[in-house]
Image (spheres, grey):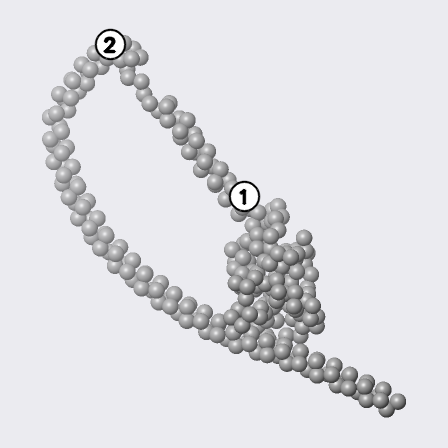
Amino acid sequence: MVIKVFLASSSGSTAIKKKQQDVVGFLEALKVEYAQLDIACNEENRMWMRQNVPQEKKPANGIPLPPQIFNEESYCGDYDTFFDAKEDNSVYAFLGLPPPPGSKEAELADKAHILENGTHAEETNGEENLDDSIEVPVEERNGDAHGEEEQAAEEEEEEEGEGGEEEEVAEGETAEDDALEGETAGDAAEEAVEETDEQAHADEEEQEEADEDREEEDLQSEEEEELRQLEEEEEAEVQEEEEDDEEETQGEEAE
């Protein structure tokens, strides 16, 4: 399986050039076999790319911009989905390729598999050992005589322990009251810290969202400019072809 990367070799957009270099450079670092298909110099490549990007993945204007990534005929995604996969260490899954042994992605997959199987094994062993944990009454194992001896010993222990139970209860109630007061004070302090952390986290998220909105607006402007430049290049090429045809026709008529 060959990975196809559709890109524009003569793009005037700095953002698009950077994205293309990022994708190609990362694939080369992973030693993944891929092919570069230029849409700026090859109309067939451009049309194939536009037709095979899923409709739900296309921008509002319906024209997808490079880089676009395919595995043979299967669509993998654009730069944004490629970047997300790179951040999650799941590029091979994104490309539809098995991760090579020893890679970080393969190790993560193995850990997930072991964790899943280990949890299942623990549940199975727990069910199997449930019956073993049920104790058989002493009377059933050793007879009624042995059971009567143990019952008498328990009665003696109960009589001896009754005197100290009242003192233990009183001490336990005092300790519980002290612990409850400490827990109440600790809970109040924790709630105050949590509220402060939540407010700080909310402020950070708002700032990040504002930065992302600005970046998206800048990128959209660059993409629109790139689209305009590509269209102008196409019109210029068509104009040159028409002028060449007119000159040939005039030369033939002059002859």
Residue 155 percent coordinates (x, y): 16, 18
Q: Is residue 217 left or right of residue 170?
A: right
Q: CA distance from mark 2 to mark 1?
A: 56 Å
**Residue, x 35% and y 24% (percent of image)?**
133
Instruction: Please state which amino acid type lies under the numbered disc 2.
Output: Asp
Say the numbered circle drawn on residue 218: none
> Residue 4 or 170: which is nearer the viewer?
4
The local crowd at label 1, few if under 14, some if 14 to 19, many if 20 or more residues have their Cα within 10 Å, is few
Q: From what the image shows, is residue 176 above or below residue 223?
A: above
Residue corresponding to mark 1: 110
Let me know if residue 28 appears in the view.
no
x and y, in percent, of residue 207 in the image: 39, 69
* 31 and 174: which is toward the camera: 31
- According to the picture, the residue beneath numbered tag 2 turns out to be 144
User: Relative to 140, is 210 above or below?
Assistant: below
* Residue 242 quadrant: bottom right
Residue 36: percent from left, percent from top: 68, 64
Position of residue 136 measured from the top left corner of the image (x, y, whole percent) = 31, 18
Crowd tier of the residue under label 2, counting other residues whose Cα lies within 10 Å: few below 14, some 14–19, many 20 or above: few
Q: Secondary structure at mark 1?
A: helix
- Hey, what amino acid is under mark 1? Asp
Instruction: Residue at 17%, 20% (x, y): give it.
Output: 157
